[in-house]
Image: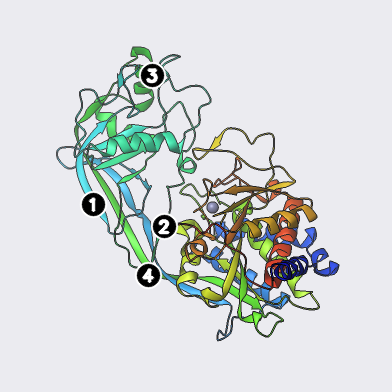
Amino acid sequence: MYKRSMLFFTALFVSVICYPQNSSIKSISIGDIKDQIKYLSSDSLQGRKTGSEGNTKAALFIAGEASKIGLKPLPGQSTMFQTLPFQKITAKPDSTFVIARDTTGKVLAKGGYSPFMIPSSPIDITGEVVFIGYGYINSRIKYNDLQGVQINNKILIVMTRKPDMSGSGMPAEGEEVSEDTELRKLSSLMIMGPKAILYVADPAYGKPIEQSFSSAESSKLVPLFKHQSWDFSVNVGIISVETANSIISGSGHNIADLQKKIAQTRGPVSFVVPGVKGELNVAIKKENVESSNIVGYFEGSDSLLKNECVIYTAHYDHVGVDAAGDVFNGANDNASGSVGLLQVAKAFSVLDKKPARSIVFLWTTGEEEGLYGSNYYTANPLFPLDKTVADINFDMIGRSRMAADTGKVRGEKLDVTGPDSIRLVSARDSREFINIVTDAGKENKLYVIDDGKGLHFSGSDHYPFTVKGIPSVFFFTGLHRDYHKETDDYQFIDFGKILKVSRTGFLTGFRVANLPGRLTIDNAPKK
Ligand SMILES: [Zn+2]
């Protein structure tokens, strides 16, 4: 008995190492990868933000390529689009501004305002204006911009960065405006209950600051397919140096003088702007928009196992255009993964015999807004989830380490991999699954680094599948210097890496889809 079962398992083991025909793996080619990424990361797609025209263009392109490859809508579906409804809220630029009036109501200053968070209802607030320098408090060096001023219920003007008191007293030379530092300042100010916070670039910085804040968005999306239990909004935004100067002009100062005075006196210069009432107005427009997941499949070749599937996922949306008009092309995030999935689909399409199980491809939308597309799919699956045996997710598979990839990006350490390696994020719930990926990598000269439940574990579309108990792996380059920046562009893509990851992903799915039984779960995630 014992011996027989050992033999049986040995036989199974031999049968799992199956090889697809060579032409199928070879069909994944650099030329196609380049063309597809070039289009998806071009300015004409305007950063593919969910609910935008560029997002729809990207969806149409992917669905078009997918049907050329031969993918079909899931059983019972007439198209490959799975449509999600959203409400899009935009701040109307002409009616979004700050005003300063004198005691008689005369307008002294008026200027534009770029909100960090788009409110769900219009804003119209008035209050006293307080200039609070950098809004910086450091007890170690006994510096406090809030000394002697009350900020509760006030409209605050705050400069970016912080003074270097061990140096010139000005912000350190070459120091960039960091979202991280500013958000830390913000959270300590917010506790004290100001009505609004107006950010202005400190004059020594001399550059626009909109692009330093990923939160400075031109619109907000509210999903209409799920219940929103809270609506969080803060009145924080950016004004120009000119606007700030005209608001405080009655004090006889301008922002540049005040910044120099802080450096010279090594102390704060905060004050209530005399004789001025500030006003902040944000008018909004609400419209209903749609954005779609794209879902297609190949039917499996085994009469029974075709009722199960392996699903591949990659998001095609990105973050759009910032308040200053910079397009975030998202070449690595995630034109690379979207194209990788097209390549994997092509490799399956040329197989003479499809794998035993069916193969589903899901290009998601709304990932950047909070995994909307993948959560929607797992709540409304087009292939039964209890028959979905594994998820293989691609999110950022096209960058390799370059000399400039040092330090941090958006507060996190850069950990982008070299040209011959890739990170694999998973719940480590199935050793067998990880071994299949690792072996498939080796055969394609790709070293797979098992990251397990690392920092990015819940940060992509594999996660809703993991939550549903489906073993999932997520291929990821690691963070590079252009992550979520307007410089995540085509010219920095390592096409050879996309080729290797796509071939590895294909081989992984092919083998899992041909396993006689399901993947062994030896480390189920705790609920
Ligand atoms: Zn992203």
Residue at horizontal 30%, vertical 44%? Answer: 98
Q: Dots 3 and 1: beta carbons under 8 Å?
A: no
Question: Between 338 and 259, which is closer to the camera in this rendering?
Answer: 338
Q: Nearer the viewer, mark 4 or mark 1?
A: 4
User: CA separation, marks 2 and 4?
Assistant: 16 Å
The image position of residue 355, as x and y in percent, is 72, 75
Residue at horizontal 69%, vertical 46%? Answer: 492
User: CA separation, marks 4 and 1?
Assistant: 26 Å
Q: Which mark is residue 219?
A: 2
Residue pointed to by mark 3: 260
Residue pointed to by mark 1: 124
Locate residue 407 relative to residue 238 in the image: left or right.
right
Q: Nearer the viewer, mark 2 or mark 4?
A: 4
Q: Amino acid at mark 2?
A: Ser
Question: Between 224 and 380, which is closer to the camera in this rendering?
Answer: 380
The numbered mark, 2 or 4, whose residue comes first in the sequence reads: 2
Outermost residue on the left side: it is 104
